[in-house]
Image (spheres, rainbow, N blue to C red):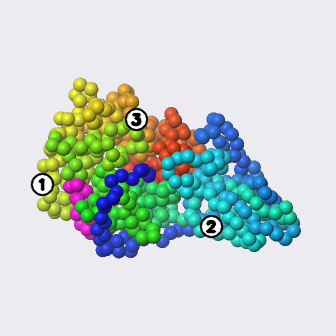
Amino acid sequence: MEEPKMQTASVVIKPNEEFIQEAERLKPALLKRKVEAVQLVNVVRDEAMIHGWKAEAAGEPALLSAKELGKGDSVILDFGDHRVGYLAFDVSSVGSPPDAPLQLKLTIGEMPVEMAEPFSEYEGWISSSWLQEETLTIDVLPKRIELPRRYSFRYVKFEVLASSMKYRAILDNISCTMVTSADISQVESLDHPDDMLERIDRVSIRTLEDCMQEVFEDGPKRDRRLWLGDLRLQALANYETFRNYDLVKRCLYLFAGVPDEKGNVSANLFIEPTLIADDTYLFDYSLFFTTSLFDYYTASQDEKTLRALWPTARRQVELALEQLDDRGIVQDRQTWWSFIDWQMDLNKQASSQAILIYALKRAIRMAVWVGCESAGRLTEQLSAIEEAALKHLWDGELNWFVSGEQRQVSWASQIWFVLAEVMPAGANKELMLRLLDTPPDIGLSTPYMHHHLVEALLVSGCQEPAVAHLKAYWGGMLADGADTFWELYDPDNKTFSPYGSYLINSYCHAWSCTPTYLIRHYGL
C-alpha cells in the first residue's frame, strides 16, 4: 500500500529505546537458498491473458552459454516461480578482445507484461524508481556480476544496449540467492481433499514466505515496508503456518517504539537506515495495533509482551474515541484518515465506526487479562458507541448500514459491522446473505477487503458462499497466472491500479496471503 501524504508537518516522535532494543534483539537471521532459471522464454501478445501478454518456452537455460549477444539482442529467463533475492551472473566475450565497454540492461519483473511493455511509458503517480530495471556498464570482460539490490521477480530480461562490432557477449551461470526469514519446514502439510483449496493454500503460503524478511513487508517489490494493516493479516496467516511468533513480536515492538507525542502509532515504518516512523497516520491502521496485540497474545500466550505493549494498545483506542462527534459516531472527514480499501468512492465513516467497535471489544478483554482498571470504563464506552451505531448508521427501512451525509450503502460498511458483531448472529447472517443477493454499487477493490468479506461470511455462519467466493476470487488469480497472490485484482477490470499503471502494482503482496489462514483456522 502507498498513498498521498496528508497532515504530516507537525508530528513529533517520542522514541521508546527499551522497545526499540527489544525489537533489535528479535531481528531474524535470513535463510538463503540458491536457485537458477528453468527456461528461456519469449513474451508474446495474447489478448486472452491478463494484461495481454504471455510467456512461451524458448529453450533450456543451458542454451544461453552458446548464445552470442550483440547490440540490440535480448533474452528473457524464467525462474519458474516467484523469487525474492539477489541476482548474479557471469558475462564474457567472444571474438576480438573487447575494445569498448559492454552496456547491459536488465529488466526484472513478476509478470510477463513487465518484460513486454517499456517502463519508459509509465505515467503513474508513484515514483518510477520502483520499476525494477538496471543499466550496467562493464569495462572489463570476463566478469562475475553480483547485483547489490534485492529483487522480487520471476522473469529477467537481458538486453545489450551497446558494445563493439569486434566482440559479442556471453551470459552464463545466472542465479538468484533467495532470502526469507520464513522456515518452510515449520509448515504442516494441508493435504486438502479439494484440489483448488490445496493449491490456493500453497500459493498463499508462498506469498507470505516471500514477504517475511527482517519484518513482515507489505510487498517485496514495492514498497518493502512494515504496514500495520498488512501486519495484522500476515500475523494471522503466520500463526496457522510458519508460527514465527518472534517476528510478529518484533514488529509490534517496532511500532510501539516510535509513537508520536500523543502516543499514536504510525501506519507504517521504515526499517533502514534506522527505524523511522512514516508521517502517515490512519484511523483504522492505528486501531489494528490493538487487535494485532490481541491476536498475538491469543496465539502465543506471551503475557510479558502483552503487559509491556498494553498501554500502547489502549492508547490507540483512547485516541480513536476522541474522534467521535456528539452523537458518538466517528467524524466524517474527507481526508486519508482511514484506509478501509482502495475504493475512491467509498465513504469510510461506517466502516471506521465498526473497526473501532471491533478493536474496543478486544481491548476490553486485554484490559481484563492484565487487570487494568480501564476495563469498566471501556465497557461503558463500547455500549454507548454500539447504541449510537444502531441509532444513526442502521437504516431499518433499507435494511443496510449507511455511511456519511449521503447515507451511502457499501459492501465495506456491511462487512465491518458483521465482523464487529454489533447485531445478533441471526441478523448478521441475514445481512450477509442480503449483501450477496442484492449487492450495493460501492464494491470491493482489493484482496484486502475480499479477505474481510470471506471472514464476515464465515463468522456469520455462511460457510458455503464463503468457500465459493474464496475459490472464485483467489482461484481467479491462479487462472490468470499468479504464482504468488497480488496486491490488486478486480475480475471485472483486470487492468485496475490505484497508482495509474498496472506495471507498478505488486504481484506478491502481504494482504493477499490470508486464504491459508481462512482455510486452516476455520477448517474449510
Residue kind at label 3, given as amino acid type: Gly
In magenta segment, residue 359: no
Mark number displayed over residue 443: 3
Residue kind at label 2, given as amino acid type: Leu
Q: Earlier in the sequence, mark 1 or mark 3?
A: 1
Label 1: which secondary element: helix
Q: Is residue 283 visible?
A: yes
Expressed as whole percent of the image width and height from the top left, the position of residue 340 reads 36, 45
Estimate how packed mark 2 is, as few (under 14), some (14 to 19) or many (20 or more) residues with alpha carbons within 10 Å.
Answer: some
Q: Is residue 485 visible?
A: no
Expressed as whole percent of the image width and height from the top left, the position of residue 244 reads 41, 64
- Find disc 1 in the rendering and name its residue: 376
| Secondary structure mainly formed by the magenta segment | helix
Disc 2 versus disc 1: nearer the observer: 2
Q: Is residue 305 left or right of residue 79?
A: left
The span from disc 3 to disc 2 (Cα, nearest Å) is: 42 Å
142 or 398: which is nearer to us? 142
Expressed as whole percent of the image width and height from the top left, the position of residue 238 reads 42, 57
- Find disc 2 in the rendering and name its residue: 147
Label 3: which secondary element: loop
